[in-house]
Image (cartoon, coloured by chain):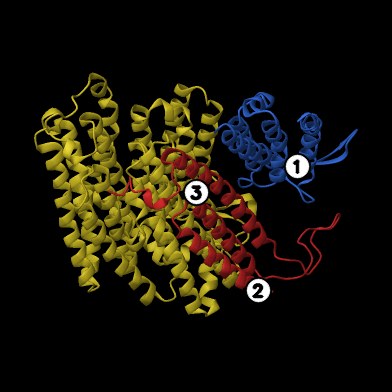
Amino acid sequence: MLIVRTVERWLRPILLLVSVYLLSGGHQSPGGGFVGGLVAAVPFALHALVYNAPSARRLLRTDPHFLMALGLFCAMWSGFTGVFLGAPYLTGKWVEWELPLLGHVDMGTPVIFDIGVYFAVMGVTLMIILSLAEEE
Amino acid sequence: MEGMLAVVVGVLYAASFYLLLRPSMVKLIIGLGLLSHAANLLLFTVGRVTRVNPPIAPVGALAPVEPFANPLPQALILTAIVISFGVLAFAMVLLYRSYQMSGTDNLNEMRRTDS
Amino acid sequence: MKLLLVFPLLIPLSTAILCMLTWYNRSLQRSLALLGSGALLVTAIRLLTRVTVHGIQAVQMGAWPAPQGITLVADLFSSVMVLVSAVIGFAVMLYSLAHMDSGRESHGYYPLFNFLMMGVCGSFMTGDLFNMYVWFEVLLTSSFVLIALGGERAQVEGAIKYVTLNLISSALFLAGVGILYGLAGTLNMADLAVKIPQLGKTHLVTACALVFLVAFGIKAAVFPLFFWLPASYHTPPVAVSAIFAGLLTKVGVYALIRVFTLIFVGETSFTHSLILVVSALTMVTGVLGAVAQNEFRRILSFHIISQIGYMIMGLGLYTVAGLAGSIFYIVHHIIVKTNLFLVSGAVERCGGSFELKKLGGIYLKFPLLAALFLIPALSLAGMPPLSGFFAKLSLIQEGLVLKEYLVSGVALVVGFLTLFSMMKIWHEVFWKDAPVGAAPLTARRQESLAGLLFPVALLALLTVYLGVGAEGLFWLSQRAAQQLMHPSEYLAAVLKR
């Protein structure tokens, strides 16, 4: 049990980092908001397994349905950028930046949409897992 | 390849219908799962099975290398899988609740709403 | 302008998001939900006027051109459906505010309701078959949760039947979509309408059409596929069963009409005759099932089935006048049937039960409620001058013109049986003396009755208006049917040719 608990603590940040990596790589290579969101839900699910569901909720600091709402909100508003520029809803718009540390960065509405998917999937997965874990 | 996949689709459908017709709730869930797998595999098969390049543009290029596979059936299947994942999770919780309340997993005893 | 077509989807979505963000503040959720359904109503009216004046509107999501990208289309049929759904959504929302219990409210009733409305509007507006599948799933998933929300034992059992049968139908729908894609290589409905006749594989397409007939038939609850409906619709709270009764089966009917006027028109002598036979059988079984029932909402559930028969009868006739009759009937039915379910909830509030045996004497105590029952009930049975009369009249007239005497006769007889069934409810619930030992009326119940009766009266007024002013709606459904029968305008709007 001690080993599991220790490993769980060390895995948490790594898993979150992996999920962000998957999310950020999503547009040009395999990955994306869906997988990223699933991976992001893993540390909390693992915590619920090792300890219990209320403890995982405390670790999350917010309710899964707020995450879902946040995700849906991002996804919905990413569609409006195109509209403000005179194109139909959900049209993809891109800008390119040269940032000091990161170098060449593509930023666009599909990325914001993907971030929305990330949070929505994370919220849904956690909602299912935590409510099932609380059933006992 | 298509012939083999067609046979697998048929077997999946047959198995799922068999399970759906059983009175057990657990078998009902497995049957529903197999049913959606069967539909997804059918979608995959009729979308033409080809052995070509993946439909992803290499770095720096604007289009994938010809000939490339049709990405649409895969996108459709991915969507359908995600949907069936969510719905099956809900159905599982529902059946579990029902099992907790009635203490049986026999669907034939569910006659409360039939009269 | 481009947003007008997206708004019927975005308004329920943003309302749902806002309701989720205010999860722990019930009173804020209630006002947000009311605001959202009001906004949807206004948008739907604007959409309909725009489509009436400027013709069919189409917009490509994400600016991807037509057969590849997803199209949202609003022709007259779909915008009429969106408007009726918005009206019903608004009325049921008003009713929910007075009727829904706090437990369900704090477990996400309002977000789910809005997701349901988004799914319904999306199914009406989409021009892409796979996208329609996705919208169906959106509305089904939220309806699954709504029907099980609260978790009473009867509810859970009803939900299991509902979920299972609807999942099977979704899987069939998906399989049909797959086969159609394999045949034609496209899923845009307008593009399919162009490509399917060029294929020349008529029989294969007809086989595929039958897959769709079964898949949508389960959702619309037509003759051999309706068993899930009376087993589940009477289990959830009244507001939920009212919105289900009004909208969900009608989405199935809409999908049937859409694909069988746009895509599967190669072998109408077979497919549409089959639909006509199914419609007659649906009418008869539904109404006979209702005669045998003794529970308010179960009677109404069986009547939904028999009325579905009328709606697809117009599709089976497959003429402009027949389809116009169908569209008129759908509009009339959605309003009247929702209203009857809402009345059943008010009766339950007064008499404490849905069982006819335990009810009685409502007329003496609440004459207003009795009058508000009579209007939709007589309209459902087809009494002039209410909307149901004109709906039935136009269908039967067209049936006689086309010499389909059998189905027209069935439609007539079923109308009389419906009247009989409504009179049974009238006698048992309102007219006869209250049974001995009936639950006495508490003050709390009486207080909240006004909130329940307001939306009921609103819908009853609408029924009367649609009867007296039938000409306007008839003109509209006539034009909508013309667009359906001659899809060239639809194709031009979507494919930009």
Under mark 1, the amino acid is Leu
In this rendering, the label closer to the viewer, 2 or 3: 2
User: Badge 1 is on which residue?
Assistant: A23
Separation of marks 2 and 3 at Cα, in angstroms: 37 Å
User: Badge 2 is on which residue?
Assistant: B4
Mark 3, residues whose alpha carbon is within 10 Å: few (<14), some, or many (≥20)?
many
Under mark 2, the amino acid is Met
Q: Quadrant of residue C311?
A: bottom left
Give the drawing colour for chain B: red
Q: Position of residue C241 (x, y in %)?
A: 35, 42
Local SS, label 1: helix
Q: Is residue B99 visible?
A: yes
In this rendering, the label closer to the viewer, 1 or 3: 1
Closest to the observer, C372 or A40: A40
Give the drawing colour for chain C: yellow
Determine the residue positioned at 41% across, 76% down. C267
Give the drawing colour for chain A: blue
Q: Position of residue B19 (x, y in %)?
A: 50, 60
